[in-house]
Structure formats: C-alpha cells, structure tokens
Amino acid sequence: MPPLTVESFPGVFETQRGRWAPIYLSPILGSPERLIIAVVAVNDTGFHIEAANSLKKLECLYGRAAETAIFASEVALNELRSLLSDRGKEALTEGALVFSGVNVGAVSDGEARSLPDLARTWMAALSSLYRYEAAELVQRAPIEQIDDGVGPQDRLPLLVLDHVNSIRPALGNYFSEEIRLQLRRRPKSKIAGVSIDFSGPKLVANFATLQANTQATAVDRIKRKMFDLKVRRDEDGRLLPQRLHEMIVFTPPRESLSLNERQLERLDDALYELTFQSSREGFNFRAMHGVPDIGARLLLLESPGPGN
C-alpha cells in the first residue's frame, strides 16, 4: 500500500484552471496612465469577463469627461465578448481589441473554483474601480416585483433574454447586467446613467411593452427609454457610426379580441406619437407582437457576417 499523503486526499472543492488577463483603459490619449476596467478569464469550456462595478469613481478624476471613458469601456468589453464568443480563448492571446484607449494586458495562468471566481479574485486584487461582492450575496428579485417609480417594471427585456438564450446563449452577453442578473433597481436619481437593454456589435436596442390598459404609464416609460437610446446613438455617432439603434415595443395586434374600439384608438395614437418622435430623433421605432418575433430580430441583425 502506498503511503498516505496530503496530495492523495481529494480536495474539498473542485477547481478549474484557466488563463486570465487584465483589460486596461487609458483615459487620456498619449498618457501612460492606465486603469484596470475588467479581468477576463478563459479556458476550453468558455469565458467570463468581470467588469469594474465602480466606474462612477472616474467622475471624481475626470468630471464630465468620465462619461466618454465609461462608454468606451462598455463598447470595448462588448467587442471582447463578441471576439471570445467567435474565436474562443485564442482571441485573448491575439490581443485583438482595436478600440482606442483599451487593450488587453499580459495573459497569466490561474486556478479557482470557477472562471467567474478566477476573474473576480484578480479584479478585486488589482483594480481600484471594483468592489468585491460574493456571488451568493447578489440581491435578486422577480422582475415583476421591481418598481422604478412609475409602476411595476416591464418584464419584456427578461423574456426576450430567455428566448435568445434558448437559441444562441452567447448573444445573452449583450443584454445589460441588470437584466442578466435580474438585479433589484435602486430609485434613479437625477444623475443616473444611460440605461440600455441590449448593446451588440451591430444593434443597440431598448425594449418596452405598450398595453391598452396602462397606456399613459407605458408611454412615459418608453419616452424615457427613447431618450437614453438617443444619448447612446449620439455617442455612437462619434465612435461606432455603423451600429443600428432601435426602440422595440411589444404591443397586442389590432385583431386581438381583448381590445375594444376605444382602446385601439388610444394605441394607434400612442404608436403614431412614438413613431414620429423616434423618426425626429433619428433612430428606428419598431412595434412587434411577440417575444419570438423580437428575438428573431436580434438573432438576424447579430448573425455572423459582414452585414445584414
């Protein structure tokens, strides 16, 4: 019988080996100053990007210019997600990010219980723009119980995410973290940032539901989502002019038996007003009648290839 050693006993937890790298942001072009905005961990089974969750600290350093730095970080990380989805771990060693001011640092080997744990551990150790929170302590709530000050929160983005995940899971990474984790929203202050539901390489979109029995509340929410989309469209105009921007609204079809003539008239008026406003602001307004239809729209526009 071989002698007993510590190594001969199984570990309490299984661990995964992977490779990880910091993602650097250079907020001032030409300056050697760099900040770590994320850590990415990869192996043969997948990847995880742990992004900075305290980017608001940049406002103390750069004032209003911090908005540009935060936006550049979001776009660059979305690009990295796309590259990792398409090419796997090879994308990390290629240093393939081509976004100005953002680059991948040195790649190192690591080991942890999971890829998210590996990325979180190094992010917490290296970045002053990150606040570590144990995964099991993340506060979740059913989306229908969330209130943003104008009524129960719209479940449509979550339903679209679930549908897209069932067909092409990698596309789910382009939905906002709030939607992906079903985080409880805090009341929005006057300085709240722009809220975007879906931000992919080819499409930026917000989603909302327009029902006849909640028309006034829904229209108000849609207008605020359209304003956020306009802000992002204007920012993209300087950096990513090729991306399509759409306000996608679920609304019951006109032939729905549950709608009376008065409700149909109110819906038509609301749709006309919202379509006119989106046209004036320079992005698309699209009314659709089912989650599968909305999901198919995302899948089509974000399909691999040079264009659609």
Image (spheres, rainbow, N blue to C red):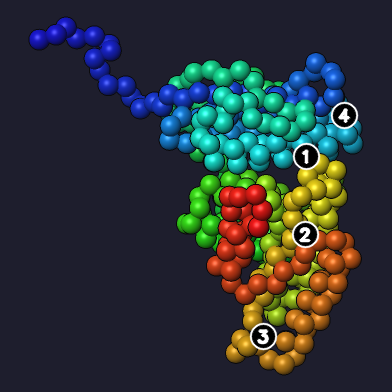
- Which numbered circle lies on residue 62? 4
Q: Amino acid at mark 2?
A: Lys
Q: Earlier in the sequence, mark 1 or mark 2?
A: 1
Q: Is residue 200 visible?
A: no
> CA gap, disc 2 to disc 4?
27 Å
Residue at the top extreme? 3
**Pointer 3: what residue?**
254
Q: Position of residue 114 (x, y in %)?
A: 45, 31
Quadrant of the rendering where the C terminus is positioned: bottom right
Q: Earlier in the sequence, mark 2 or mark 4?
A: 4
Could you tell me which secondary element the residue under label 4 belongs to? Answer: helix
- Which numbered circle lies on residue 71? 1
Q: Residue at x 84, y 18 (%)?
A: 31
> CA gap, disc 1 to disc 2?
17 Å
Quadrant of the rendering where the N terminus is positioned: top left
Residue at the front extreme? 306
- Residues marked 3 and 1 touching at CB (< 8 Å): no
- Which numbered circle lies on residue 15? none
Q: Position of residue 170 (x, y in %)?
A: 53, 47
Please state which of the two labelled residues, at mark 2 or mark 3, is closer to the viewer. 3
Residue 41 placement, left or right of 277: left
Binning the other alpha carbons within 10 Å of mark 4 as few (below 14), some (14 to 19) or many (20 upward) gives some
- Which numbered circle lies on residue 225? 2
Could you tell me which secondary element the residue under label 1 belongs to? Answer: helix
Could you tell me which secondary element the residue under label 2 belongs to? Answer: helix
